[in-house]
Image (cartoon, rainbow, N blue to C red):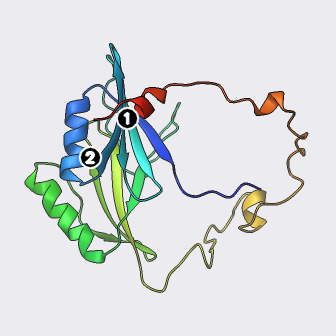
Amino acid sequence: MPRYTGINHLAMATRDMEATVRYWRDLLGMRLVAGLGRAGYRQYFLEVSETDMVAFFEWNGVEPLPDKDHGVPVKGPWGFDHVSFGVSEREDLFELKARLEAAGCWASEVLDHGFILSLYSFDPNNIPVEFSWPQPGVDLRARPRMADRDPPPAGREGPDPVPGRWPAPDPASPDDRRVYPGEGREILTHDG
């Protein structure tokens, strides 16, 4: 099984990179670490932590997401509800709430979910954003918990991957291991 190191980047879309950078970098404090661009296309990366980033594509014609509160069920095509960023201190939630409100952004009250405290807001693209602080003494990664009274069969099998549920892959040939050039290589040759 692969070993994951975190979310390298979560890619979202905007039609206004200026407003997006102002919110994520200047208001939330995430460093802008890379930017790609040409006519009709931009992709910018912002650092969340040492291992995690968010990225935004700027495309003409992108519209903000429709109004939808965090975790409220919807019908029809949908694939994303909200993104939650962990914060290191309880006080960070209250600082973020004050910063968001001072900037004219809506921010919820801080809510106690038992295992985390959460603050909710929306970015300029109407992307639902949550900030979470883990409650002391509750570590779901160290001690997973299932509170669903009627989980599907896979949920009843426990937290660890179950071997044999998928076909074993064939060993990769040298041709299957070829790496092809993609977008972003210009970052390596451009200082700035």
Marker count (numbered): 2
Q: Residue at x 48, y 86 (%)?
A: 137
Q: Position of residue 20 (x, y in %)?
A: 25, 37
Q: Position of residue 184 (x, y in %)?
A: 46, 29
Relative side of 90 to 139, left or right? left
Mark yes or no: residue 58 visible: no
The amino acid marked with disc number 1 is: Phe
Q: Residue at x 53, y 30 (%)?
A: 77
Q: Position of residue 65 (x, y in %)?
A: 34, 33
Question: From what the image shows, is residue 14 above or below residue 5?
Answer: above
Q: Secondary structure at mark 2?
A: helix
> What mark, if any, has residue 134 been given in the picture?
none
Relative side of 139 to 104, left or right? right
User: Label 2, on which residue?
Assistant: 24
Question: From what the image shows, is residue 36 above or below residue 99?
Answer: above
Mark sitting earlier along the chain (2/1): 2
Q: Are marks 2 and 1 in contact (CB under 8 Å)?
A: yes
Q: Residues within 10 Å of mark 1 (few under 14, many from 20)?
A: many
Q: Residue at x 31, y 24 (%)?
A: 63
Question: From what the image shows, is residue 121 above or below residue 184?
Answer: below
Quarter placement of the N terminus? bottom right
Q: Residues within 10 Å of mark 2 (few under 14, many from 20)?
A: some
Image quadrant in which you'd find residue 145: bottom right
Relative depth, front residue between 22 and 129? 22
> What mark, if any, has residue 56 been given in the picture?
1
